[in-house]
Amino acid sequence: MDDPFEEFIDRADEKSRRLKEQVDEAGLFVKKSVIVFAYYLLAITFGLYVVFVVYLTVAPILLASLNPKYVNLGAYAYILSAFTYLCHQMPERSFIIAGIPLPVCARCIGIYVGSVFGLTTPFISGKIREKMYSIKLLAFAFTPIGIDGVSQSILGLSESSNIVRFITGIIFGLLFFGYFTSRLLSKNSLFNETVKSKEGLMVVILATLLFTSLAYSNLTEHLSLDYISSAEAITIAIESGKTSGEISTYYIPPKSPLSIHADKFLVEYEDYVLSDLLSMKWTYGEYSRSPEYLKSIENLSFSERHLLGIWVVVESSGRGGGGRFVYSNSPGTYVYIDGYTGGIIDYKTH
């Protein structure tokens, strides 16, 4: 006859074993869920990053719009890039669309575009993905951008072109980000089963669109910048009596007036806008940060210091000669207008 006490112990052990299995299964489920959630969060972040890069590339078009919402939305890209120190915003080192430089220079936009392709390596074919694992490619990522950057900025041997800056930026962004994303995600079975599935990709796309919509709504509806449009800048210049005839507009990003002072090659440009900025005392004061200047601006806001972007309204009186220029070297009147306050900073006649 079985011992009742031993039978009780056996039943207790069985229940304990089952309970332990259930706890272990629950623990594995929670662990798996957390990892899957982290993968989705990472993928959605990648999606929002792609949206951000697209936003940077279309910012000049938005800023040139006549719609106040789009003007404000475009201006945020320039102000964000300036005050997060993403780029020096030198116009002569940037691609320019209709007189408006991109919010970041050619090299930076190259890095952003390259990184977008680099971040997609977990989603592309296996052979290409495997090649991205190479430590040699990672080392090579730094070579073109390093040689070009050092020879230009540090040694001052020769100035690079925007195309070269863009290409070296793409190479760096593609290989650098491609290496780490392929290492971290490409061979991860859980990532492949969830995020890379059709359902997973749909979740990522819909979530990215949702967050993009929320960001757009907040930037255009709830955080009104009331930025000056190019058309309003022209009206201000005409009403001031400074201009009246054939008019063109250009845009100077927030950080440009300060950063161009550091460009060793700017003397080679025959550009009235850049030379005017260099001649303005406030730009040199901001760049030099002398004690006297710091004392004079201690109670002034960024807008009062003209550090939120500038419109240039040009009434041309003839055609400029040959030479190298970014904005314009045509004779005429150049009116400089603060993009935030609408106040006239200065005007020059060439």
Image (cartoon, rainbow, N blue to C red):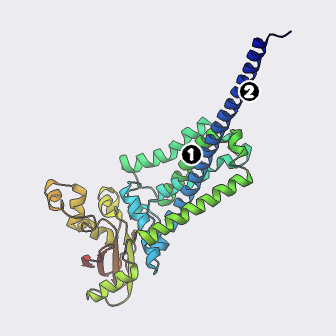
Residue 247 position in % (x across, y down) = 37, 85
Dot 2 amino acid type: Arg
Residue 42 position in % (x across, y down) = 58, 48
Q: Quadrant of residue 302?
A: bottom left
**Quadrant of the frame with the C terminus:** bottom left
Between residues 2 and 171, which one lies in front from this camera angle?
A: 2
Total numbered labels: 2
Mark nearer the N terminus (1 vs 2):
2
* Identity of the residue drawn at 23% across and 67% down: 279
Q: Is residue 57 above or below residue 313?
A: above
Task: Tell me the residue that label 1 is attached to.
Answer: 177
**Label annotation for residue 291:** none
Question: 10 Å neighbourhood of mark 2: few (<14), some, or many (≥20)?
Answer: few
Q: Quadrant of residue 259?
A: bottom left
Report helix, strand or loop for mark 2. Answer: helix
Give the distance between the C-alpha atoms of the residues marked 1 and 2, in whole angstroms: 46 Å
Residue 169 position in % (x across, y down) = 51, 52
Q: Is residue 54 above or below residue 126?
A: below
Task: Tell me the residue that label 2 is attached to.
Answer: 18
Q: Is residue 124 left or right of residue 72?
A: right
Question: 10 Å neighbourhood of mark 1: few (<14), some, or many (≥20)?
Answer: many
* Identity of the residue drawn at 34% across and 86% down: 235
Between residues 71 and 117, which one lies in front from this camera angle?
A: 71
Residue 202 position in % (x across, y down) = 69, 57
Report helix, strand or loop for mark 1. Answer: helix
